[in-house]
Amino acid sequence: MATPNGTQDVPKLFGLPLKYISLVTLTFQNSALIVIMHYSRTMPGYDSEHRYLPSTAVLLNEIIKLAVCAVVAGYTRGLKNCFPEVFSNDCWKLAIPACLYTVQNSLQYVAVSNLDAATFQVTYQLKIITTAIFSVTMLHRSLTSIKWMSLVMLTVGIALVQLPNDILSYVVSSLNGAEEEEQEQRVKDTVPGEADMNRTLGFIAVTISCVLSGLAGVYFEKVLKGSNASLWIRNVQLSFFSLFPAFFVGVLWKDGAQISQQGFFFGYNSVVWTAIFFQALGGIVVALCVNFADNIAKNFATSISILLSFIASVYFFDFVVTVNFILGALIVLSATFLYSKPERRPVSATKDEFRPAPLQSISEDSQQRNPRLGAANEKLS
């Protein structure tokens, strides 16, 4: 909205521009959630037999999200209008992305259990590649040469991060004639405290999670393009349909026997509850704030969150800094900025119709084309 003197009126909250509040919120959400989730799965005193079950956390996450979104939807739309809008004729279309998001959330717990927070944050940028691929194949969009180059850079950067610890220094030292035994010992010394973590399993989990995130986001856009339902109504539908796979597949089928013996809340503590509430409520807060943040702010938030996760991993989890991680992270950040660089489009180009996006995920291409589409749960997503 323009002011009387012709300048643009900047939305503010408590006297602060919402753009900067969005930046802080996105940064805090992206970094804190992954660090807390990782700690909840690796904290001292809780081995693999005494940790909480991820299936119960995923179910509680959806229940909390459903309750919050339902209350807001009922308040904003009215109870009489809310029920028919939630259970509209096309509501069944949300069942597919809801199932995909549920599996994605479950795989994220597997990933953070086997990867440190910093490595997970960098590797999770694979969702940009998967979203781009599904956008080309399902939505028949074309990517510029710059975007394809950024995707190649992103792949190289993530590959460097996933290489064995400090392998680049190992290769350089080997070429200089260092003793083999000394090099082997050096590689072993770079992974203290990671004996219980399976990096291969973690990488597979985060890769599949990124594929599901990209598929669900693009499917959501393809099937529900042009829908007039509000953000809250769509997320009530998503959370409602997510309850079924979370309960019947995760809680009953996968962990039913263990839950019947140990109880639903076995292994829970304050850290676990904090991770659950961060994942549920954090996505809602980000969805509200991201409408006021542009792509540059989003990229800064991603970069700062990776940096904060890196610092937290070094300070709290004895993460060892390696040459290949630093180089790979820098390449990933550069590729992210390059991919999200705005394209020059003709003035007469048709704008995409407004459509509220799910809290769990969003197509990277869609967000660049229309900033009003909303934000992801990244997360954890």
Image: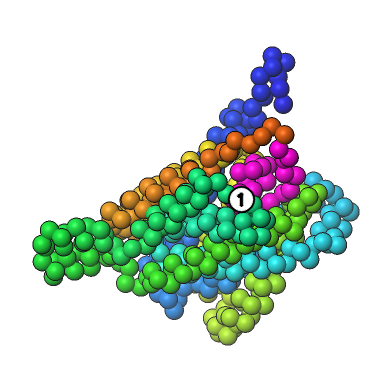
* Above or below: residue 381 compared with residue 346: below
Asked if residue 354 is among those painted magenta in the image, a careful observer would answer yes
Indicate the secondary structure of the residue bearing disc 1: loop
Q: Which residues are magenta?
A: 349-377
Quarter of the picture holding the C terminus? bottom right
> Along the horizontal axis of the image, is 174 left or right of 237?
left
> Along the horizontal axis of the image, is 133 left or right of 126?
right
Q: Residue furthest top?
A: 5
Q: Residue furthest right?
A: 80
Q: Nearer the viewer, residue 254 or 181?
A: 181
Q: Amino acid at mark 1?
A: Ser
Asked if residue 338 is among those painted magenta in the image, a careful observer would answer no
Residue receiving disc 1 = 142
x and y percentages locating residue 176 in the rendered image: 12, 58
Residue located at (51% from left, 47% from top): 145
Quarter of the picture holding the N terminus? top right
Q: Which secondary structure type mostly characterizes the magenta part of the structure?
A: loop
* Above or below: residue 223 compared with residue 368: below
Residue located at (56% from left, 69% from top): 106
The answer to whether residue 109 is seen in the rendering is: no
Instruction: Determine the image quadrant of residue 155.
Output: bottom left
x and y percentages locating residue 126 in the rendered image: 49, 58
x and y percentages locating residue 288 in the rendered image: 65, 44
The answer to whether residue 198 is seen in the rendering is: yes
x and y percentages locating residue 41 in the rendered image: 45, 67
Residue located at (73% from left, 67% from top): 95
Residue located at (50% from left, 51% from top): 148
> Along the horizontal axis of the image, is 127 left or right of 93?
left
